[in-house]
């Protein structure tokens, strides 16, 4: 490995607002990080809470293939020693083979936060590192607020690093704790430090100035051998340096190895796994690992992509486990639809059919439809252009009533009339529901289930409503998006109308038709 990846998602990442992990969550994520191939996994601060204590207890019983489990803490108390310090004892009791401790670099913190002397601060750094080394622990030293401290007093900042070196720290990590250092400052300071200390150094960057990733890369270019960060950039305030950008940049742009040979292609899956475990909505616009990172919407772009995938992509998305996507909207051209037809295995003959669907999409989007996420609706529009295609049912009419009835409260009932291919019989059914859309869904299922038993496996997974022109009040156009799943697949359909029932029916009917034809 050329560069050590030090992951602190389980400790620094959990300081992100709204981001919480149980001990079991931490174990699951740690195992996936180990499978990815990072060098260090910082499990938490064992002296700070019972959850982190439990994590280290469980981690000791597991076998780790690639990573070293690391415990985080601080130097010992001022005017005291490490041998009787509860924080240092908790690090040792964690059983972690590597301990990372932070110490003060910035004179402002030494004098006003620790309320001690510069000399005593150097003492506790050296003694804390030395004591942990004497307990047979590898020690990484995080120089907190290093860049702010260096800019305020370069000589003293260097002395704090030398104190950690005398104690036996294997790596000195320069921390941009406030996240305000600019890339050119990182470059200059790292160049100076590398010469002054002649010791392995690393970088721990925060993203308060949107420079976490570039600061980490600049540090590597200037000799850093370790990069600390978090998956998806989670962390306090604006987050930490995002390892999901740093890792592919190191491997694909700087040609530096930081993961095992098969690690990089697992990055997309890991990114979304962490979001799922932490119950976070994925940021699909993240570089490299977002679903939109290789999504192409403009017609000119897609036309070029069909000739050469390199024309509008800086890397092959498969290298990090992602994939190229074509998005359909009113900005699309024929190439977008040809690509979607190929993706869904729909046979479209000639340009007239594609042009007709494209014009229909543009017209519908002007009315409030949005097909970017409703790919099942697009696939259906293309499917209907096939020469011998027959829809699994024909909607004749429907009725929905909502009433308030004594002792029952709000009551919804729907009736539908549909016809299936090969039969002149009109299927006329009614059903109740806990709302108008649910009643429509139940009535349609009641009519179609005898002909299509597979429909019993379809489940409504999500139902979203958006008011498009709210200044129109109750006359506003409503967009409805429905997610449906059958256990193995999930698809999205869309409807839009000034009447929310009509918009819902359009999305619902498309969801059922797609499931019975394209998905099935």
Image: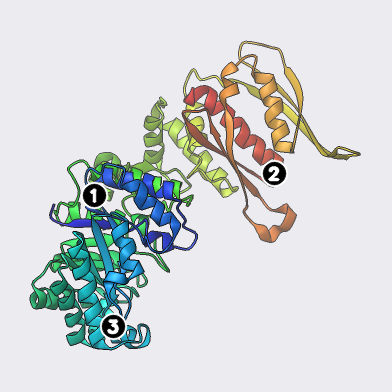
Res 205 label: none
Left or right side of 460 for 85: left
Res 106 label: 3
Whether residue 252 is visible, yes or no, is: yes
Q: Residue at x 62, y 14 (%)?
A: 451
User: In the image shown, does 71 or 130 lie closer to the viewer?
Assistant: 130
Sequence-first tag of 3 and 2: 3
Image position of 67 with respect to 392: above or below: below
Which image quarter: residue 484? top right
Whole-percent x, y for residue 244 in the image: 30, 54
Whole-percent x, y for residue 254 in the image: 15, 57
Left or right side of 381 for 194: left
What secondary structure is marked by label 1?
loop
Badge 1 crowding class, 10 Å Cα cut-off, few under 14, some 14 to 19, many 20 or more, is many
Sequence-first tag of 1 and 2: 1
Whole-percent x, y for residue 175 in the image: 27, 71
Which residue matches tag 1? Answer: 67
| Cβ atoms under marks 1 and 2 closer than 8 Å | no
State how far apart marks 1 and 3 are (Cα): 31 Å
Left or right side of 154 for 109: right
Whole-percent x, y for residue 116 in the image: 32, 87
Badge 3 crowding class, 10 Å Cα cut-off, few under 14, some 14 to 19, many 20 or more, is many
Q: Which residue is drawn at 32% across and 64% down?
A: 89
Which residue matches tag 2? Answer: 500
Whether residue 299 is visible, yes or no, is: no
Q: Which residue is drawn at 33% across and 47% down?
A: 59
User: In the image shown, does 436 or 409 lie closer to the viewer?
Assistant: 409
């Amino acid at each position: 490995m050329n560069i050590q990846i030090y992951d602190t998602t389980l400790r620094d990442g959990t300081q992100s607002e709204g981001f919480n992990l149980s001990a079991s969550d931490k174990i699951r994520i740690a195992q996936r990080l180990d499978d990815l191939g990072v060098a260090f996994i910082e499990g938490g601060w064992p002296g700070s809470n019972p959850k982190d204590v439990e994590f280290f207890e469980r981690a000791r019983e597991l076998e780790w293939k690639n990573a070293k489990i690391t415990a985080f803490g601080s130097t010992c108390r001022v005017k005291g020693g490490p041998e009787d310090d509860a924080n240092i004892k908790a690090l040792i009791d964690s059983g972690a083979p590597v301990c990372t401790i932070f110490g003060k670099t910035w004179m402002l913190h030494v004098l006003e936060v620790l309320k001690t002397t510069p000399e005593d601060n150097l003492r506790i750094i050296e003694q804390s590192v030395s004591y942990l080394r004497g307990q047979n622990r590898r020690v990484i030293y995080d120089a907190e607020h290093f860049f702010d401290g260096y800019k305020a007093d370069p000589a003293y900042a260097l002395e704090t690093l030398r104190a950690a070196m005398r104690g036996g720290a294997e790596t000195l990590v320069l921390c941009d704790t406030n996240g305000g250092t600019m890339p050119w400052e990182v470059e200059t300071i790292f160049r100076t430090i590398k010469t002054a200390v002649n010791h392995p150094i690393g970088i721990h960057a925060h993203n308060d100035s949107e420079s976490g990733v570039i600061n980490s890369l600049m540090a590597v270019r200037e000799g850093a051998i370790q990069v600390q960060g978090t998956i998806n950039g989670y962390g306090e305030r604006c987050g930490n340096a995002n390892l999901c950008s740093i890792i592919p940049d190191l491997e694909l742009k700087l040609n530096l190895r930081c993961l095992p040979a098969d690690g990089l292609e697992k990055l997309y899956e890991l990114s979304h796994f962490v979001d799922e475990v932490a119950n976070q909505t994925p940021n699909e616009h993240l570089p490299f690992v977002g679903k939109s990172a290789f999504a192409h919407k403009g017609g000119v772009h897609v036309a070029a992509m069909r000739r050469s995938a390199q024309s509008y992509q800086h890397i092959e998305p498969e290298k990090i486990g992602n994939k190229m996507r074509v998005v359909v909207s009113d900005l699309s051209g024929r190439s977008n639809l040809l690509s979607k037809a190929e993706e869904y295995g729909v046979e479209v003959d000639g340009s007239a059919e594609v042009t007709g669907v494209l014009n229909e999409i543009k017209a519908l989007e002007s009315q409030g439809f949005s097909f970017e996420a409703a790919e099942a609706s697009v696939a259906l529009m293309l499917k209907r252009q096939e020469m011998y295609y027959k829809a699994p049912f024909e909607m004749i009419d429907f009725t929905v009533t909502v009433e308030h009835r004594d002792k029952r409260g709000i009551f919804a009932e729907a009736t539908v009339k549909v016809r299936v291919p090969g039969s002149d019989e009109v299927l006329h059914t009614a059903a109740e529901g806990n709302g108008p859309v649910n009643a429509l869904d139940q009535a349609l299922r009641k009519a179609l289930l005898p002909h299509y038993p597979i429909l019993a496996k379809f489940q409504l997974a999500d139902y979203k409503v958006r008011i498009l022109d709210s200044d129109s009040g109750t006359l506003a156009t409503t967009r409805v998006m429905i997610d449906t799943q059958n256990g193995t697949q999930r698809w999205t359909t869309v409807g839009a109308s000034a009447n929310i029932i009509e918009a819902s029916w359009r999305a619902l009917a498309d969801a059922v038709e797609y499931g019975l034809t394209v998905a099935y």
